[in-house]
Image (cartoon, coloured by chain):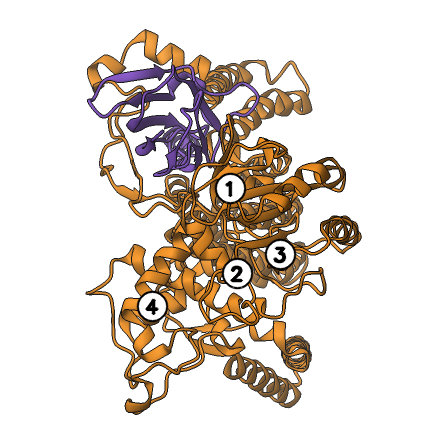
Chain colours: A purple, B orange
Amino acid sequence: MTVSTTLRAALGLGVLLTFASNALAHAFLDHAAPAVGSTVRTAPSAVKVWFTQELEAAFSTIKVIDAKGNVVASSDKAVDASDRTLLRLAVPALAPGKYRVVWRVLSVDSHVTEGDFTFDITP
Amino acid sequence: MGCATPGRVATAVCLRCRDGCRRPTLARDSFRGVAGVPLLQAVSVAVAGEILIATLFGQAMAWHLGLAVVLAVVLVLARAVVERRSLVRIDLIRGAPSAGVLATLAWMGHAAATRGTDRYMHLGGDVVHLLAAGAWLGALPLLAMVLVRAAQRQSVEFDRVALITTRRFSGIGVTCVGALLATGTINAWYLVGTPAALIGTVYGQLLLTKLAFFAVMLALAVHNRLILTPRIQEAISPKAEVARVAMRRITRNARVETTLGVAIVVIVGALGISVPGAHTEISWPLSFALDLNALDEDHRLQHVFSALILIGLVAAAFALRSFRRERRTTGFVAIVVATSSLALFGYLSVIPAHPTTYARSPVRYTTAAVAAGATLYRSNCETCHGADGLGDGPAAMSIPVRPPNLTSGHALHHLPGDLYWQIAHGIPGTPMPAFEGRLAPGEIWELVTFLHALADDQVARRLTSRVSDWRPIIAPDFPFETAGGEQETLEEQRGRYAVLLVLYAYPESRTRLIALTEARATLERAGIRVIAIQFDARPPVTAEGIDPAILAISDPTVVTAYARFLPPLSGAPEGTQPRDAEVFIDRNGYIRSVRIGPDSAPANRVADLVRDADQLGREPRRPPAFGIHMH
């Protein structure tokens, strides 16, 4: 094999290997307020969800659904400016009942995770 | 880039949710891709643009590809200008974009997600790691090519060039290897974290394979440097044949190293798409493990272990030295000493281990978990193990092997994962049955959590109404709401306030609550926050003279969990709940004092609390109660 063929082969391999890196680490739910599965007496003014990794604001969404399935609040610009592990969603005055929070986030190292949890408001 | 990665399966992952909910919240890998739209829609300028501009890894990728284009242009043009410019500048012009292409990979990897100040350390280490690997793996094929040419031509001129190249490559090799080892250790610290994760996760096992290949490469490089290169040096002198053989060996080694290097890059690709060992479940693959926990208790054992390891290492080094000096007998003796020393260390520290031994509990130490665990314990375990875990249950007498004291030091040595396995699969050879058919995994973890509380109960019996020596009694977490406020948790107070948890009944504790209201400012100055919860978990009372800010409401499990830590009421029938109790929790989340019963001199109590808080402030720093990094 001549030197130039070797070099070309190496270059080709190098280009191929450039795309080998596609990192994945997940942003999991760390804790939330109202707490996951908990019952609160006063309706919260905002739903806050903290994650284990920093999030990309452009592709992270959160919404709150009531017991009947109506979306009471949602946002795709919910990543807090000062703490990028926090998704903060302001909610209107919520009536007592069971609510479901559905989130879908993109962590800074390019992986998507989604999930949901519920909380109860009882007077 | 907004497209689905082929072959990825949607998996449901049980979250390490900090709130310890019984139904795990599911996080699913989304194979609809980053943008959340179907594949055809995703391949559009708008989505691609947003990813490239608005996300960190998108920006890194843009730089990466841009610099690759620059590099390609430079490589093509460099040949044309080589006659007119100095070689050093050519190297810089070619080297800079290629270094950039490598370095931008760091921002597309796991290092970009590290938080805080560690981020710069991790990213910096990653960049150096990439550059060192690139330099070494890039130079190896060139070395091989020069040597092959020299062997083909067989002239003194080419031999001299080959020798110079080999020597210069050695210099690069040593620097790169040193950098790789140092930065690799830093990265492993962040991404693997513990030795258990190194062996028990896919990521860790891939890393071990990579290290094995690297070790072989290193051995070959050392052989080249220390043994073969000096032989080539004699090429110009009479021993030409020896030199020629050495050169052939170096060539072969360089080729093998290149192959191993490519294999390592493939493994790195696999590592890049795996979840880092520090952030995933550890499933221990061996049936035994080294128990170094025993070192915490027994200091003599610590000295014995250190001595054994030291003897082993010294003997091994001595053996190496003896063999190099052709002293076979001393070498063999040293090897025997080294092996027996390390074997003894292994024998003393080995314990049986199970797949879940190093698993982290998905259930946090909360009052809800302790209460759920208590209910499960009553219906499943109390008959044999007894109400307090001392092994004195009603059925204990009739079984052949007496149940152990679950609250003793020996039982506590077991890691939570070990306890999980023993409950789920029983203990062979003993009457302990397997519960995995009867209890869900979450329930077994709640039992393990309860066992922790059970053991703490015994220690808590020594608590008094004043703060004394520190004991690791962790205060179980719980959420609460104050009047008109948002929901908070006990854990959020950690690092900010010491907490005085007051359990009260109304109207019996009225005077107490008024006294606390009056003392609130003093207590706050001492860094103590008062949280008062009713024994029957009713909403806070509204009464004159009582500050609503100290009243809170929570769920009934708070009372059931904390009542366990209270001393028994003297002179009252067993099981009577005191009407007034206080638990003092320090800023790190540990329970330091408990007090029950009516207070004869409330003002004294406040002064005592302030003095205690002051004393706590002068204590040495302790690890915070929930210091485990959980996912």
Q: Which residue is tagged 3? A: B598
| Residue A43: image location, x then y, percent | 40, 24
Q: What is the distance, in whole Å, between disc 2 and disc 3 at their CAs?
A: 94 Å
Residue B250 relative to residue B353: left or right: right
- On residue B120, the disc is none
Q: Which residue is tagged 2? A: B245
Question: Could you tell me which residue is drawn at 62 percent across and 25 percent down?
Answer: B91
Q: Which residue is tagged 1? A: B137
| Residue B531: image location, x then y, percent | 58, 42
Residue B101 relative to residue B423: left or right: right
Residues at discs 1 and 2 in contact (Cβ within 8 Å): no
Inspect the image, locate mark 3, and give the three-letter code of the amino acid beneath it.
Pro
Pointer 1 local density, CA inside 10 Å: few below 14, some 14–19, many at least 20: many
Residues at discs 1 and 4 in contact (Cβ within 8 Å): no
Q: Which of B243 and B229 is in front in this view?
A: B229
Whether residue B599 is situated above or below residue B327 in the rendered picture: above
